[in-house]
Image (cartoon, helix red, strand yellow):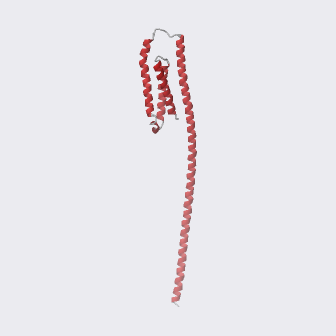
Amino acid sequence: MNLITIRKTSLNEQVDKAEQILKKDPTNEQLPVLIDGLNNSYELLSIDFHSVAKEERKNHREDLRHLRERIRFVQNEFKLSRPQVIGARNINTPLTEEALIDHARSVTDSSVQSLNRTVQIIEDTKTIGAATAVKINEQTGQIVRIQDTLFSIDDQIQNARNSIGRLLRSAASNKCLWICIGLIFGLLIFILIWKKKHK
């Protein structure tokens, strides 16, 4: 599983959570924090998307478009619910100490969850990076072995060329030797015939 897939999965889970909270309680104080987190996560995902090869982008383009639409839907629904929430609440009524504590806890919990997701993504990235490094190391070893094999083949080809050259030179020398022997033999026959004619 690569980093983009991990980020897509995490972002889908965040959007699911935001949609559930929005349906149950539009006044929930976690929503603004969650929506900001959605936008930040989507920006990180977009950066990762543009950093990969064009061939790999085809596998993720449609998913990113769908995620962007879901995030916009959550944002729009949240904005539409704000006037109703404000109208339903008496803004002159100060928040109690307990309400402030609950709000602080809600924001803290949301921040901790976001931080945990970020840490998980970092750990997953480390794992992927380590696996990639191992693969690169293995491929480097294979390349070195292939290069050594090519050098060995080149040496064998050179040796074969030298052997063929020696054979050709030997054959040429043998051919010259046979020609000389043939000439000598022919000359001897000519001399013998010539002597017989002049006796």
Up-down relation of residue 111 to residue 90 (above or below): below
**Residue 162 picture quarter:** bottom right
User: Which residue is painted at 49% across and 21% down in the image?
Assistant: 33
* Percent position of residue 26, x then y: 46, 18
**Residue 64 picture quarter:** top left
User: Which residue is painted at 56% across and 41% down in the image?
Assistant: 135
* Percent position of residue 50, x then y: 46, 34
User: Which residue is painted at 57% across and 47% down in the image?
Assistant: 144
Q: Nearer the viewer, residue 64 or 132?
A: 64
* Percent position of residue 146, x then y: 56, 49
Residue 35 visible in this rendered orientation of the protein? no
* Percent position of residue 161, x then y: 54, 60
Number of marks in the rendered image? 0
Residue 146 visible in this rendered orientation of the protein? yes
Up-down relation of residue 143 to residue 46 (above or below): below
Residue at the farthest bottom position:
199
Q: Nearer the viewer, residue 65 or 166?
A: 65
Q: Nearer the viewer, residue 197 or 143?
A: 143
User: Which residue is painted at 52% across and 32% down in the image?
Assistant: 6
Up-down relation of residue 165 to residue 177 (above or below): above
